[in-house]
Image: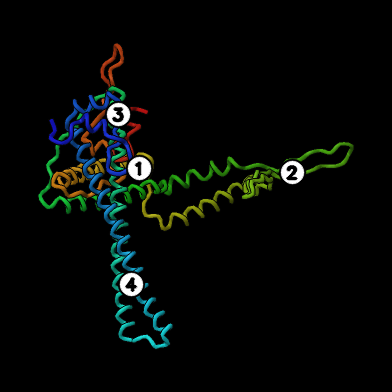
Amino acid sequence: MHNLPPASDIARAPTRAGGDTFISAHPNVADWLDGHPDVADLLSLGQRASTALAAVAEGALAATNGTRAALDDAKAAKASYVSECDLAGRVPDATRIERLDTAIARARASHDDADGDATAAAGAATAQRGGFMHATKLVNDIAASGSDIEPSEDITLPKGDARDLVAAQRKALEALDEEERNVKRAPIPEADALDAVAPRLLATAQPMRAYLGEGGKGITLYPPLQNVHLASGEVVQTVDVVALLTSLFPEKMVEAAQADLRARYANVELTLDAPARAAALKGIAERRLAAERVEVAGLVQLWRRGDYVPLRPQTDPMVFLGIEAVIKPSAPGAGSLVNRLAQGAGSLVGRALGN
């Protein structure tokens, strides 16, 4: 068994903001954690990190309050001296005013430093709390549903300082996020886009409509109309100029649209068709999973020695808990169903249980 707080203690801890765990009091959860000591160990470490980081944030806030009071005192000392001189009808001593101004400047610098530290500490505590909540929710859902898990294989960390290792992986993860955004934003190849112009544009063509008036009143012509939604919420009808011109000059309209499209592709560096996009995203997900596993292993190493670097809020809870797959209970007459989850696509809590 793990040598940190018993799983049953973790499961029955109070649920409140700060460093405490968010594990459910459901009886299945305590029993499940007792049967999965490695997961319980990681949750206990995460709880300890959350508590420590919350305490640091609280201390940093208290320090800020202290430096704010010191700054107010320094300002008050100068104001009191100037007021005293005014009442006595004498000119304030320039040397003393300089000393008082220096004291104010020092107090302000100390307060600014403390305020920056408090902001950073609060951000670290919030990040840890968010990442840890995702992990505890995943355990709650898995245990309450009676599911089991397939653990991930252990990894061997590269040599070097764990903090540097975590920082390097986070830099790599940021680069992967940017690469993923570029892949998702990339348009389809220019040739495919040009081929799609004609059928899409010609499908909008609508000719003029003619109506015969009764009693020899002549002919009335109506252009094609379209509904336009105004910012006010009102819907008005206007002439659909594109539809009309396409019905009259189909070839010229297609040529104009394709020319505009070619101009838009002039500065496009990356284009992807559907298979290439899917392959690129799959490769990014695989690299993200590998980087995140090293990052989490480095974090756990740091936590075990009392160095509490926070989780990222986006940390995959499956990776943090060392879970490769969630195994649902067997249905009557059926074998076990193993849900292998695609990694690195945000929170996997719902997908883990096939929701």
The residues bearing labels 3 and 4 have C-alpha atoms spaced at a distance of 51 Å
Q: Which residue corresponds to the image point at 62% horizontal and 50% vertical from the top-left?
A: 231
For label 1, the residue is 277
Disc sitting over residue 222 in the figure = 2
Disc sitting over residue 120 in the figure = none
Disc sitting over residue 74 in the figure = 4
Q: Earlier in the sequence, mark 3 or mark 4?
A: 3
Numbered disc in front, either 3 or 2: 3
Q: Position of residue 148 (x, y in %)?
A: 24, 25
The image quarter containing residue 76 is bottom left
Other residues around mark 2 within 10 Å, as few (<14) / some (14–19) / many (≥20): few
Q: Tell me, yes or no, whether the two marked residues, 3 and 1, touch with CB atoms within 8 Å.
A: no
Q: Position of residue 171 (x, y in %)?
A: 25, 53
Q: Which residue corresponds to the image point at 33% horizontal and 34% vertical from the top-left?
A: 349
Numbered disc in front, either 3 or 1: 3
Instruction: Out of 305 and 291, give the one closest to the viewer.
Output: 305
Numbered disc in front, either 1 or 2: 1
Disc sitting over residue 25 in the figure = 3
Other residues around mark 1 within 10 Å, as few (<14) / some (14–19) / many (≥20): some
Numbered disc in front, either 1 or 4: 4
